[in-house]
Structure formats: structure tokens, C-alpha cells
Amino acid sequence: MLQKWKRLSSRPIFKSKWLSLFSRSYQLPDGKIVKDYYHVSRPNYVSVIAVNKKGAILLERQYRRGVDEVLYELPAGWVEKNENVLSAAKRELCEETGYTGRAEKIITLYTNPGFSEMKASVVMIRVTGRKQSRPGKDEAIKVGFYPIQKVTAMLKRNRLKDMVSVAAVGYFLLFVQEKQSS
Amino acid sequence: MLQKWKRLSSRPIFKSKWLSLFSRSYQLPDGKIVKDYYHVSRPNYVSVIAVNKKGAILLERQYRRGVDEVLYELPAGWVEKNENVLSAAKRELCEETGYTGRAEKIITLYTNPGFSEMKASVVMIRVTGRKQSRPGKDEAIKVGFYPIQKVTAMLKRNRLKDMVSVAAVGYFLLFVQEKQSS
């Protein structure tokens, strides 16, 4: 029988709005106590599969400082406090690209379940319109709709490397796409 | 044209073998300087798709303290210093489950490209044998081979939530499985 661990303490090492780091101790199911297990807290985020009427998927290209590379990605962004994931997805898509549409939750994913509770919600938005986009001050983003065949080829060749984008696009191609295009 | 940012400084806030946190400043392509961007360093890891002769995939169930849940996952583990990803995948699979086999790299994924260089390599291992397993001291793991149809259903119903497992299994079902079973 797989049992949960019991958290005994959580000592903050660093706290900020966007990232907090804790050192935690736990009691294991066999009674043993383990210490200095690091835990990272970051806000939850959304990853958006925006699909236009032709069934093409919106991809962004942007510089990502963590890996110091320009990457292809789905639109994504943090979920604000007291915001639901569908609203967050619509807000992020509109801010980054100007596109608007109907939102539908697809799946929930844990990014780093070993050391963080951070959760990504994958949301599909069927694009129906476009407003003026208002990218954030540091966001230099190239945006384009890519036909399914092209996205499939990019995924296959590992030109998509962003993990949440790979998970979301893979799921979409396997389980959502046919319903969508019919 | 999408340009990289120039890193000006990286101040360590916390350092340990398993996790380090930095506060970084950058110069943006337009010359502006931004400060206090957090960066998390963790070792790279491998995610293992172990396939037996019937084409079934090995899944683990284990408690994950980051999300305080028992999850289904692919076997995974850190890559040691000076270890290549195929060796790391074979070592982790054998330690956690006892299974051995031929390893082949599938894709590379960036877990958190916005704030970490952490990289996951997805490795397929065609299982050919089994040794005594030697799980790590804190690892209570249930292991089983699941037929492709079952894994597909679990993925579809979001019973797989671990992001790297969803990305890896989705990729496998889309692009690797047919070659594998032929």
C-alpha cells in the first residue's frame, strides 16, 4: 500500500511573489524522519492551444532566458490570484496575440511533482476574433498559425522542446483534434 | 528578429547539490536592464519508456511530495555528473525496477525554460532481462507493465498527470509505437 508522507516542517529559505523556496522535513510511512528536502513554490500557469477555423494551431517563438534559446511554444502565462484557468487562458492569449475565442479545459499537468506543487492547465481556445494585442513589457514574441501537419512534423522532429507544449500538443493530436475538425 | 538577452549578473541566493537559486539581471535587446529575475538550477534528468516484448509500457506508482499525491509515472531519475543519458536511464530503470535492456534516446525536453535550464531526456528501453531491484532508501514504488490500450486510456482520461510522462507517452504513441511493434 502506497502511503503519503507526513510533512513535519517547512522552513522558508527565500520568499517572493513569483518564487519561494522551502526546506522541508517529512516522516516517512515507516516512521523514519528525513530533512532538508527542497520545495519550490511558483504560481500555477496555463498553456493555450488556440485553434483557428481551419484547424491550425497558434505557436509563438520567443527568447527563454532559463535555457538561453529562442523556442517555439504554445502561449502560456501565470494564473492570477482568484482567477479561474479559463479566464487566465483567454487573458494570456489576448494579451500576447490579440486573439479571442471560446475556452475549454483539456488536461491538468504537474510540472515538477517531486519538488513543487506547480500545476499547468492546458486550455483549448477556438479562435473567433482578434483585438489589438498588448504584450507585456519584456515580451518580444512572434506569433503564427501552423497547419496541423506542420505542427505534427515539428513535434516529431523535436523542434518543440518546451515540455508543456509537447505534452499539450501531443494530447491534442491524439485525443482532441478529430472531434475539433469534425 | 528575435534576439537573446545578455546576462549581466547572477547572484546566488541559495546553493546546494540538488537545487540552487539565483537572482539574475539581464540587458534586453532594446538596451533596457531588468533585475531580480529568478533562476533555478537543478540537475538534468531522464524519463524512461520501458517496453517489454509484448509492447506493454512500464509505469510506476509512487508518492510525490511536491504535490502530496500518489501518481502514475514513467521511471525517472537524475543524471549524475559525467554520466550520459542512456547510462543514466539504464541505471535508474534497473535501480527502481530491476529491468534491463537496450536504450535509445527519443527526445529532449525543457521542463521550465522560463526560469531553469533543467532538461529531461526521454529514453526508450527495450526490456530484455531482469535483475534484483535496489530502490533508493526513500523510494516506495509499485511497478507494472500496462498494455498500450490501457496506457492510452489512462493518458486520455488524465490519470497520468506528471508532465514529463504525459509528454513522453504522447510522443511514443504518436511516433514510436508503430516502428516498435513491427
Image: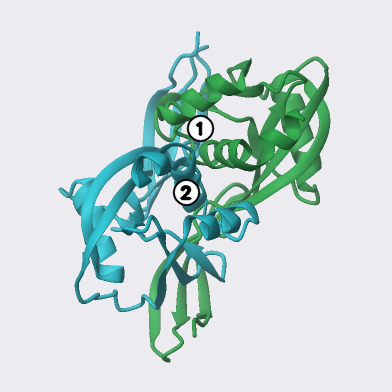
Chain colours: A green, B cyan
Amino acid type for the residue under numbered disc 2: Val
The residue that label 1 is drawn on is B35
Q: Secondary structure at mark 1?
A: strand
Q: Are marks 2 and 1 on the same chain?
A: yes
Q: Is residue A138 visible?
A: no
Image mark count:
2
Q: Residue at x 49, y 19 (%)?
A: B28
- Labels 2 and 1: the sequence-earlier one: 1
Q: Residue at x 52, y 57 (%)?
A: B151
The residue that label 2 is drawn on is B169
Q: Chain of mark 2?
A: B
Give the numbered dot on residue A58. none
- Other-residue count near label 1 (Cα within 10 Å), few / some / many at <14 / 14–19 / ≥20: few
Q: Is residue B119 left or right of residue A144?
A: left
The quarter of the picture where residue B121 lies is top left
Residue B62 in percent (x, y) is at: 46, 72
Q: Is residue A96 visible?
A: yes
- Mark 2 near mark 1, Cβ–Cβ under 8 Å? no
Which residue is at the front of the view, B107 or A136? Answer: B107
Tell me if residue B87 comes above or below residue B108 in the rendering: below
Residue B129 in percent (x, y) is at: 21, 65
Q: Residue at x 67, y 25 (%)?
A: A136
Q: Secondary structure at mark 2?
A: helix
Amino acid type for the residue under numbered disc 1: Lys
Tell me if residue A96 comes above or below residue B57 in the rendering: above
Q: Chain of mark 1?
A: B
* Mark 2 or 1, closer to the camera: 2
Residue B112 in percent (x, y) is at: 48, 42
